[in-house]
């Protein structure tokens, strides 16, 4: 398939620029991947789509205040955007400046001076004045996505963060989890649905457009993940009682599928470059809660692999007609798999 196969028209006014007053007040579009049938719902209806015995898997990564502004000694402005920490005071970052960046450059910030060590592909390695994550959190802004055309405010410190976030390291939120508030989590637990966590630190590459037309030529960005033994045991219990593994977000799904790359889910950690496109047969995930994704993006390709390419494009066209809110602060979908993508029975 080609990049153009994942294009759709989206009016700018449907891109959500701010969260709704209540986390769980979003709309929910349910798509049956077997038939293509759609239902317009409210996110408050999600518990009715779940079954007792299901397992909801959340990504517990925590977003770091990843964007810092500084200046060269000459006065030129520099934007520093964290990609990932390396060691106590070393990190890989994106640097943006009006003139070329060079190794050994000192960048002045309100939190002290950074030193540019050298280039690493499209990224730069820097040394921070203090431990990397603590320094960015003390001096940075919340890294709202590029399609949100405003400066982050105090509200974003809370709302661009899941209630279940606990492991710092992401530079973008796992946005499907932003819809869950405490009453919603309590309702789901009371219905007999189990909850578990996986960690995948979302990188800035999640917003990068594909630069090739042939999907087979795309090199996926790396993101760190951890699947522990407790999660594997939770999945095994879910299978034993006949429940479904429901991933909350594409990041939770990618972590689970990455840990099952050898065929069976097993504890694991490291970098994943898993690029899921139509034709992929899912090994772990039986249903997916997700937001709407950018045209021609790797995440749109993933959900097309899960629920069917034609079904997803039809659902997105429906969502545009019905004025759903798109992207990070937008509305959600509940997807079940297309027959060709569904996990094989065990």
Image (spheres, rainbow, N blue to C red):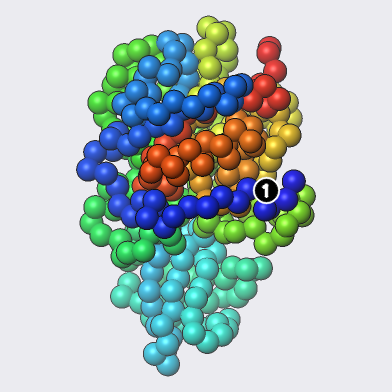
Q: Do we see residue 167 in this rendering? A: no
Residue placed at 38% from the left, 78% from the top?
Answer: 70
Instruction: Out of 20 and 184, give the one closest to the viewer.
Output: 20
Instruction: Out of 187 and 14, give the one closest to the viewer.
Output: 14
What count of labels does the image hold? 1
Instruction: Out of 64 and 89, give the one closest to the viewer.
Output: 64
* Residue sitting farthest toward the bottom: 74
In the rendered image, the vertical position of residue 126 relative to residue 39, given as above or below: below
Q: Horizontal and vertical percent for residue 256?
A: 59, 32
Q: Horizontal and vertical percent for residue 88?
A: 47, 59
**Helix, strand or loop status at disc 1:** helix
In the rendered image, the vertical position of residue 217 relative to residue 233, given as above or below: below
Q: Which residue is mark 1?
A: 5
Residue placed at 60% from the left, 51% from the top?
Answer: 7
User: In the shown orientation, is residue 76 left or right of residue 99?
Assistant: left
Residue placed at 63% from the left, 43% from the top?
Answer: 301
Quadrant of res 177: top left
* Residue sitting farthest toward the front: 321
User: In the shown orientation, is residue 296 left or right of residue 169?
Assistant: right
- How packed mark 1 is, by other alpha carbons closer than 10 Å (few <14, some 14-19, many 20 or more), is some
Quadrant of res 184: top left
In the rendered image, the vertical position of residue 14 relative to residue 32, given as above or below: below
Instruction: Out of 31 and 299, give the one closest to the viewer.
Output: 31
Quadrant of res 305: top right
Q: Do we see residue 162 in this rendering? A: yes
Residue placed at 30% from the left, 19% from the top?
Answer: 187
């Amino acid at each position: 398939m080609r990049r153009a196969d994942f294009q759709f028209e989206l009016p700018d006014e449907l891109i959500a620029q701010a969260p709704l007053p209540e986390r769980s007040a979003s709309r929910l579009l349910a798509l049956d991947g077997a038939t293509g049938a759609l239902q317009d719902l409210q996110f408050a209806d999600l518990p009715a789509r779940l079954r007792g015995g299901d397992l909801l898997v959340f990504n517990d990564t925590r977003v770091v205040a990843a964007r810092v502004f500084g200046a060269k000694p000459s006065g030129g402005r520099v934007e520093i955007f964290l990609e990932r920490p390396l060691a106590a005071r070393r990190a890989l970052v994106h640097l943006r400046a009006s003139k070329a960046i060079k190794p050994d450059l000192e960048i002045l910030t309100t939190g002290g001076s950074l030193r540019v060590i050298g280039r690493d592909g499209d990224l730069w390695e820097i040394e921070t004045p203090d431990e990397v994550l603590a320094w960015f959190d003390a001096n940075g802004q919340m890294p709202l996505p590029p399609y949100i055309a405003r400066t982050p405010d105090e509200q974003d410190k809370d709302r661009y963060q899941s209630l279940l976030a606990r492991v710092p390291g992401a530079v973008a939120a796992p946005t499907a989890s932003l819809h869950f508030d405490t009453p919603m989590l309590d309702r789901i637990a009371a219905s007999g649905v189990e909850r578990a966590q996986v960690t995948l630190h979302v990188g800035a590459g999640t917003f990068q457009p594909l630069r090739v037309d042939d999907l087979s030529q795309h090199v996926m960005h790396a993101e760190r993940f951890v699947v522990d033994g407790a999660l594997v045991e939770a999945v095994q219990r879910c299978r034993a009682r006949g429940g479904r593994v429901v991933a909350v977000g594409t990041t939770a799904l990618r972590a689970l599928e990455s840990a099952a790359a050898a065929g069976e889910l097993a504890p694991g950690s490291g970098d994943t470059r898993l690029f899921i496109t139509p034709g992929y047969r899912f090994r772990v995930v039986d249903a997916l809660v997700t937001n709407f994704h950018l045209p021609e993006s790797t995440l749109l390709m993933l959900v097309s692999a899960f629920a069917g390419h034609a079904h997803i494009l039809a659902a997105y066209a429906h969502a545009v007609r019905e004025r759903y809110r798109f992207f990070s602060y937008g509305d959600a979908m509940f997807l079940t798999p297309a027959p060709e993508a569904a996990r094989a029975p065990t």
